[in-house]
Image (cartoon, rainbow, N blue to C red):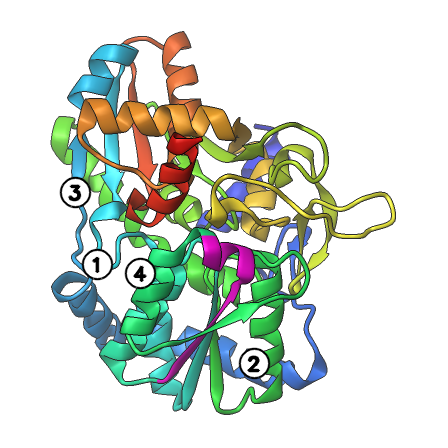
Amino acid sequence: MKNEDQNLLKALLNGELPDESGRFGSFGGQYAPETLMPALKKLEKNIKIFLNDETFQEEFMNELNSWAGRPTALTYASQLSKRWGVEVFLKREDLTHTGAHKINNALGQAMLAKKLGVKRIVAETGAGQHGVASAAACARLGLPCTVYMGAIDIERQSPNVDRMKQLGTEVISVMSGDQTLRAAIDEAFRDWVSDPENTHYIIGSVVGPHPFPYLVREMQSIIGKEARQQMLDFGENLPDAVFACVGGGSNAIGLFHAFLGDTEVELFGIEAGGTSDDLGENAATLASGKPGILHGTYSMLLHDDDGLIQETHSVSAGLDYPGVGPEHAFLQSISRVKYTSARDDEALELLREVCEYEGILPAIESSHAFVEARKWAKENQGKRILIGLSGRGDKDMPTLSKLMNE
């Protein structure tokens, strides 16, 4: 890393980033309608209070431990280790209540929202896991919840739709736009704008206007804190490389953050490569995107020369997003994290390998991380790697069954 980049990394680790304007270097910020600014400022003020409040943190950790199932396991993948020639460890977010890392953020934000005295929650979801997590957290805390979900995602993630309804949440099908995650976020923002005083928007990833990227990262940082200590407890050594899938980027930033200061540890974020490198046939924002503004933040986006946001494609509903969290764009800009992509067929191949040799059904999203991990292992025999298994694949069975039949 260049000296300038090292200084920026130090500023991030010292808590100086995001800065007062909500920026990680040139990325981030607060691009929101005037009607939302009071709610954003109120949220920003209370984040500073409650994230540093011992009582709130104790309550939050108690709920994570007793209800959400933390700490999650660190699993030594013995069969993959033999096949790949490296020591493979999995951080098992698939073992949390509701089946993915999303519960960490949904629970934390719901608890914060209740402290703020709001009367209802709105959320968006793509793969459905954030919707289920928000529904469960709101049921736990007695808060009404409405989840917006693209019509296409409702079709391919029907088990999660049913779960949300069973948990007492209203699920609204979004028929506008691309009918996937981007459109769902648009509708959730419109709902929030209509009543920001009585509503809190539990955004599902490290995207959106400041302070959301920071807030979600803090809620998800428990993943990396646990994993780092578990690796040391297992063999007194940190991993040589860490891999996580990236859509908006919450599971990846949660896993990476504890390792950012360990510069000897390589970090890899893997996006959805879809079916080709052509615009509209993938969701590899950091690999092929350009800077721009979407959903209240300045980050890397998939847009054309006229600045129009393009539709994306991925076999994975949770990675099917044309933007990425600003902190990821920042980490790429200072060369601390390397971002690559994996194609649909590669992710499905690795999903089957993990199933057959480890007895674990990973989410299609998580399977993208295994693709780059296996490639890296071929060139780094004998090393030790950590893969973020962000969620379980039960939700993907309709998609997998359809593909198997085809």
Magenta range? 144-155
Mark 4 vs mark 2, CA separation in Å: 22 Å
Check disc 1 and report the residue beneath it. Answer: 97
What's the amino acid at mark 2? Trp
Check disc 4 and report the residue beneath it. Answer: 104
Query: Quarter of the image holding residue 384?
Result: top left
Mark 3 vs mark 1, CA separation in Å: 13 Å
Mark 2 vs mark 3, CA separation in Å: 36 Å
Against 294, residue 395 (above or below) is above
Circle 1 — which element?
loop
Task: Name the N-terminal-most of marks 1 and 2.
Answer: 1
Q: Residue at x 55, y 47 (%)?
A: 320
Task: Name the N-terminal-most of marks 3 and 1.
Answer: 3
What's the amino acid at mark 3? Ala
Q: Nearer the viewer, residue 74 or 41?
A: 74
- Label 2 neighbour load within 10 Å: few <14, some 14-19, many 20+: many
Examine the rendering and report whether any part of residue 194 can be seen.
yes
Check disc 2 and report the residue beneath it. Answer: 192
In this rendering, would 195 be left or right of 232? Answer: right
Mark 1 vs mark 4, CA separation in Å: 10 Å
Check disc 3 and report the residue beneath it. Answer: 73
Q: Nearer the viewer, residue 110 or 46?
A: 110
Task: Name the N-terminal-most of marks 2 and 3.
Answer: 3
